[in-house]
Image (cartoon, grey):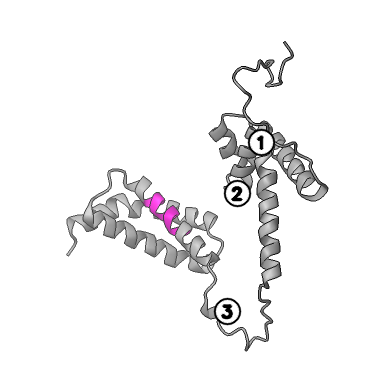
Amino acid sequence: MATALDDWFVREILVHEQALAGYLRRCWPHRDELHDLRQEVYCRVYEAAARAVPAQPKAFLFATARHLLTDRLRRSRVVSIEAVGDLEAMNVLIDEVSPERWCGGRQILKRLAEAFDRLPDRCREVVWLRRVGELPQKDVARHLGISEKTVEKHLAKGMRLLAAYFYGGDGIAPRAAPADATQATDGHGQQRAD
């Protein structure tokens, strides 16, 4: 016997089956999993609607599908401990980190942090957002209120300066301490001789 929820599901969700199948085909590379994905999306939507019927069913359906794909992608990136559990049986040599290597790594990180701190402010922001935050160029541009071309230029400059400092010596001048309030500066932050 069909319930009101079943009727709602058929009327508001199942009518989008073809569009959902197309979306999943475009977004998920494993064709053999598409049927299971679609069924899981339907289960999630039905269970959520049992608690509270969404105001915009189609948008909710596709948001649910997107979240499911994101969850699956995250899980696929995690390596199972069991899969790597018996390394001796696989004849894999595990290189233990010696105190010298650990200390050397700390020194490298310290030098990199120093180089990073010496970057010009905007350059440092761009490098951080692109390389550490892994934001797309378009998002960095929007976040900082600059053009994508400017993001490219700052990133190239920042990477060049980091490499020069890190590998070639002092490629980046140390950042100046804030000027004393009594010292006059020109329009570019340079000390002016009065």
Sequence-wise, the earlier of marks 1 and 3 is 3
Q: Are marks 3 and 2 in contact (CB under 8 Å)?
A: no
Above or below, 183 relative to 125? above
Q: Nearer the viewer, residue 166 or 9?
A: 166
Rounded to the nearest whole Å, what is the CA distance between mark 1 and mark 3? 40 Å
Look at the magenta stretch and give its main secondary structure. helix
- Residue 136's image quarter? top right
Q: Which amino acid type is marked by label 1?
A: Cys
Above or below, 111 relative to 137? below
Crowd around label 1: few <14 · some 14–19 · many ≥20 (10 Å): many
Q: Residue furthest top?
A: 194
Q: Which residue is mark 2?
A: 132
Q: Which residue is mark 3?
A: 84
Q: Secondary structure at mark 1?
A: helix
Sequence-wise, the earlier of marks 2 and 1 is 1
Q: Secondary structure at mark 3?
A: helix
Q: Which amino acid type is marked by label 3?
A: Val
Q: Nearer the viewer, residue 175 or 151?
A: 175
Q: Is residue 3 magenta?
A: no
Identity of the residue drawn at 80% across and 50% down: 167
The answer, for residue 129, to whether it is visible in the render is yes
Taking the image as shown, residue 148 lies to the left or right of residue 169, namely left
Magenta residues, start to end: 61-69
Which is closer to the viewer, label 3 or label 2?
A: 2
Q: Quadrant of the N terminus?
A: bottom left
